[in-house]
Image: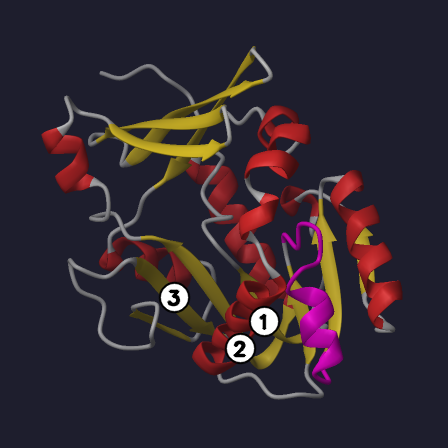
Amino acid sequence: MNERQPHVDWDLLFGDDYDYFDLPDLTPELSSEEASAMVRLGGFEPGMDFLDAPCGHGRHANILASRGFRVVGADRDERFLAMAREEAAQMGVDVEYHHLDLREMDFAGEFDAAVSWYSSFGYFDDETDRDILRRYRRALRPGGRFLLDMHSPYRHIPSILANHDMHVDVLRRGDDMAVDIQELDAEASRLYAEKITIRDGKVDRARYSVRMFTAPEILEWFRTAGFAEARVMNEHGGPFTVSSRRLMVLGTA
């Protein structure tokens, strides 16, 4: 039996190395495209009260606010929230940012729409993650919709099978490198990973794990969290298949 426990080195994963390696790829054009995808996949409309949690550094929340949504952003990282507020001021948009952990969300019937984007769900044990999903549900008004975006559980399997039970991503910035090594625990249905960054000759290591879901399993989680209905789809809104890059879930309160 695998005795590893869910764990995330938050500050190491989202510190200076994140800014150096990851932020350059999160262009305004990409953020705009992803915000459009959220609206299309969720069937959201301008004028809605919209919860973006976790919102990170506000790259989607600020764009959605510029498009007529009344946006609340929530995140555990004060540094990211400062970045989000600064960008909001530069864009001339109004977003209400909250410093809080997903485990502490206590919104009640305040939103028409909510989103969790790019595999931001599943980092705790199952009991905690089920509670977080219930908190998303409670945040919605009747008929409100929650869009959850996750990795497909099938995405890494071919690479894992071909690469000694590991999936490896490598990102280079000049002479510097970030290497993400992921192992899939089939019994726990969880990726255990280590991100190794080599920058200016300095090596840092950050560990994290994230839950992987099949479609029937996540739909059962939505049902028991109190959603009236839920459906899965791929990243384009079409049928979810073994070749889909993302697993999207749309739940209705």
Mark 1 touches mark 2? (CB < 8 Å): yes
Coordinates of residue 207 in the picture (x, y in percent):
48, 22
Q: Is residue 29 above or below residue 123?
A: below
Residue 185 is left or right of residue 17, and the answer is: left
Label number found at residue 32: 1
Identify the element where label 1 is drawn.
Answer: helix
Q: Dot 2 surroundings within 10 Å: few (below 14), some, or many (20 or more)?
A: some
Q: Which residue is mark 3?
A: 249
Mark 3 touches mark 2? (CB < 8 Å): no
Q: Tell me the CA gap for discs 3 and 1.
A: 21 Å
Based on the displayed image, in which of its 4 quarters is residue 125 positioned? top left
Q: Tell me the CA gap for discs 3 and 2.
A: 17 Å
Residue for point 71% across, 51% down:
57
Pick the front one: 212 or 246: 246
Pick the front one: 93 or 222: 93
Label number found at residue 36: 2
Coordinates of residue 129 in the picture (x, y in percent):
49, 44
Is 59 part of what is drawn in magenta? yes
Identify the element where label 2 is drawn.
Answer: helix
Q: Pick whichever of labels 3 and 2 is earlier in the sequence.
A: 2
Is 245 part of what is drawn in magenta? no
Q: Dot 1 surroundings within 10 Å: few (below 14), some, or many (20 or more)?
A: some
Q: Dot 3 surroundings within 10 Å: few (below 14), some, or many (20 or more)?
A: many
Q: Is residue 142 visible?
A: yes
Range shown magenta: 54-69
Coordinates of residue 244 in the picture (x, y in percent):
23, 61
Which of pointers 3 and 2 indicates the residue nearer the eye? 2
- Tag 2: residue type? Ser
